Image: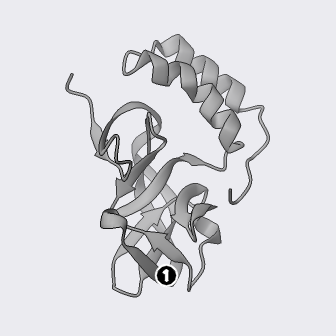
């Protein structure tokens, strides 16, 4: 179909098509959290973006030195450093399995902008529609999302 595809650690769907971007702005300059592990690998993501830390979804801003992150190949690595940085580009792709691999790390497609179960429910119609999501559906989901309380910092 020509749409973007991302890697995942889901054994049933090692590659998942992206059906929706809740953010896609190459010009945005935003604060990010750069997490560096003891082996020198790193990932930068928004503070509200969930990453798999200590076996659960955790907002990046809550990841701490000593936490354990998941990497490709079912490898686990220990966080050695975290720092706040400003970076250009803000992207948030969504896949049918709600996760993806970014810079070798297992991350969620979700953020703490709203509770996880509610986000999954709101995204479900778009997942069902695949990449052919009508713009009106996207606009409706974004409108509803503005009025929803924030999610927890970890699940």
Residue 42 x, y percent position in the rendering: 38, 74
Residue 93 x, y percent position in the rendering: 42, 40
Label 1 belongs to which residue?
Answer: 79
Quadrant in which residue 123 is drawn: top right
Q: Quadrant of the N terminus?
A: top left
Residue depicted at x 52% and y 79%: 82
Q: In this rendering, is residue 112 above or below 79?
A: above
Residue depicted at x 56% and y 45%: 110
- Determine the secondary structure under disc 1: strand
Residue 150 x, y percent position in the rendering: 75, 46
Q: In this rendering, is residue 29 above or below 122?
A: below
- Residue at the front extreme? 12
Of 50 and 86, nearer the camera is 50
Can residue 104 be seen? no
Q: In this rendering, is residue 70 above or below 117?
A: below
Q: Quadrant of the C terminus?
A: bottom right
Residue depicted at x 33% and y 77%: 41
Quadrant in which residue 70 is drawn: bottom left
Q: Residues within 10 Å of mark 1 (few under 14, many from 20)?
A: many
């Amino acid at each position: 179909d020509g749409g973007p595809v991302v890697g995942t650690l889901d054994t049933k769907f090692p590659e998942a098509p992206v059906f929706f971007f809740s953010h896609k702005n190459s010009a945005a300059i935003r604060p990010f959290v750069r997490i560096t592990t003891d082996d020198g690998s790193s990932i930068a993501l928004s503070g509200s973006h969930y990453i798999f830390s200590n076996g659960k979804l955790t907002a990046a801003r809550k990841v701490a030195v000593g936490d354990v992150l998941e990497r490709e190949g079912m490898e686990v690595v220990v966080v050695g450093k975290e720092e706040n940085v400003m970076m250009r580009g803000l992207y948030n792709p969504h896949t049918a399995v709600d996760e993806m691999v970014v810079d070798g790390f297992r991350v969620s497609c979700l953020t703490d902008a709203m509770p996880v179960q509610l986000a999954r429910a709101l995204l479900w119609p778009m997942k069902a529609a695949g990449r052919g999501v009508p713009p009106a559906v996207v606009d409706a989901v974004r409108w509803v999302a503005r009025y929803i309380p924030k999610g927890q910092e970890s699940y």
